[in-house]
Image: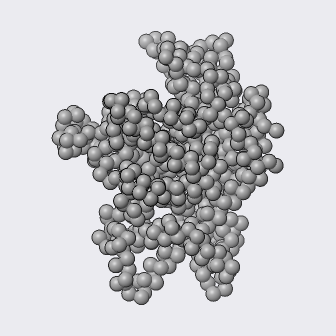
Amino acid sequence: MSHPRNNLSPDNRIAGILTPLSAVRGRNDIGIGDTESLVELAEWAAKKGFRVIQILPVNETGSDHSPYNIISSIAYEPITLATNPEWLPDITAKEYEQMTQAHCVAELREGPVSYAAVAALKRELLETGYKNLNRPKGDKARRRELGDFETQESEWLHDYAIFRALMSWNGDDEVVTNWPLEHRSPEAAKEWMEQLSAQDMAALDERIGFFSYVQWIAMSQWKAVRARFDELGMALMGDIPVGVSIYSADVWAEPGIFDLHRSSGAPPEKVFKSDPFTEKWGQNWGFPLYNWQAMARDNFAWWRRRLSSSREVFHLLRVDHALGFFRIYSFPWRPQENARFLDLSYEQAAELAGGCLPGFVPRDDSTPENQDYNRRQGEMLFRVFVEETGPHRLIAEDLGELSPYVRPTLEALEIPGFKIPQWERNGNHAIIPGADYARLSLATFATHDHPPIRQFWEDWNASAQDPARRDHAIHEMREILEFCGVSEIHLPQPFSAEIHSAFIRGLFACNSWLAVHQITDIFGLSDRFNVPGAVGDQNWTARISGEIAAWDRIYKREITSTIEALRDTGRKLS
């Protein structure tokens, strides 16, 4: 099989699948998709003619399990790891069987992801592996490999492992401000550790060693995933979240390279009607801003380290919220305070927030001088990123409230952006034909934040039953079908196999280098993975019905239609 770098020229139009790893059901998963499941997905997809698998971030997350709320810019989320003896060789088959039975893994494999239960089981398996490795009769060669890993990755791993050990010491609470003062900074923690008793220091060292071990296992597994993708001629697209949690190992270790006074987010968008705060004020993500001047002093070493580590595993990298590197919308209050501001006027909110309101920084786009300042900042940062990744390896998520300079700057740097057909419109507000898309782009109908295309259609069809909204709804349905090359079809009508086939084929037919269908769109499902602004357990818990091995049977018609579209549109490479 050819190596994917031979196939990743923009001259070749290729197709991909977007899915949260958590949603995939593998033959051996224990309640959530993992590294083994991802390999299984790649093997399935390669046989169909796909060449790219796009996943959401797999960095270690906070307690809300959002893949975009990460507590390390480099460390992998332990729950993504396969923990059977084939992938975790430090445990025995008997230990694995006993622990999975005790945790009722059959129940965990059914229904949505139960994060707490799955995390507890995987922690127990990893703890067992670590203890086995460190027994007198443990594998000495593997212990040496772990030691080599700790040395090679010490630049980030040392502080991370101490941070995670302190987090464990404080009841697995990542909220650093809840910790005692002597734990809240590396300097204070060092002084505290020097005063520990021998017994307490041994206990802390054991935790530091364990969290280093988990990341060694993680890096080993993810590199194995990369190797299998290479063998299959597949490319794996990772995701670089725009921010890190204010309660992250990064902020704890290097607070000076962050701006901790404001909270990053996105401006109000009327499309998000699920949450009144999001509709009025925007999304308050809670991530600290970057202190770009401080980062520049060491030539953006933090970013270079982050991107270099990611490129060891991922062939392509989606840069989340690319607009934020030019200028980012931010709040003068933390998300925990959102409710206080919901019903206030702008004047009242400014008074409560010390004279500040949410807005863009470093500057808004109100003057040509401000626009040029923001443009130059974004261009400088993306040049740094391309230096670390190489050409055509970054995909900029350039969606949202676009400034006029963003896409031209990215195009000049040959960084592909996103094309969502229903929102890509010309000066007359008509949908732009897919044939007119720039080759250096990624086309998709939906990201993880949006409803699948079936839900869009069903919403339009429901609106068409209302006489007051009928004409507008039918117009939207007809527009998107014409984009897909279908004009002779009676409207309105419910979602059907014919409409599903049109959507699959229409996206693949566009000129974009990458055409990526969300997995729910491929299977014609209406399940959502995330509803921005929603609070509760429903986000990031949805899983695709059936194991990968059963998809050809469960979704036979949809898969057959997809394979035909891949072939007919020239995206199925030999």
Q: How many marks?
A: 0
Position of residue 21 measured from the top left corner of the image (x, y, whole percent): 60, 50
Compare residues 388 and 78 and report the one nearer the observer: 388
Position of residue 115 measured from the top left corner of the image (x, y, whole percent): 51, 56
Question: Compared with residue 408, is residue 180 higher up or lower down, i.e. above or below?
Answer: below
Position of residue 202 measured from the top left corner of the image (x, y, whole percent): 46, 84
Pick the quarter of the image with the C terminus: top right
Q: Quadrant of residue 355?
A: top left
Which residue is drawn at the image coordinates 50% and 79% (left, top)? 206
38 displayed left or right of 201: right
Position of residue 104 measured from the top left corner of the image (x, y, whole percent): 59, 62
Compare residues 247 and 251 and report the one nearer the observer: 251
Question: Compared with residue 121, is residue 557 higher up or lower down, i.e. above or below?
Answer: above
Does any portion of residue 53 appear in the rendered image?
Answer: yes
Question: Compared with residue 460, is residue 200 higher up or lower down, i.e. above or below?
Answer: below
Give the colouring mode of the picture. Answer: one colour
Does any portion of residue 365 appear in the rendered image?
Answer: no
Q: Quadrant of residue 195?
A: bottom left
Question: Compared with residue 320, is residue 491 higher up or lower down, i.e. above or below?
Answer: above
Compare residues 387 and 312 and report the one nearer the observer: 387
386 displayed left or right of 16: left
Which residue is drawn at the image coordinates 65% and 75% (left, top)? 145
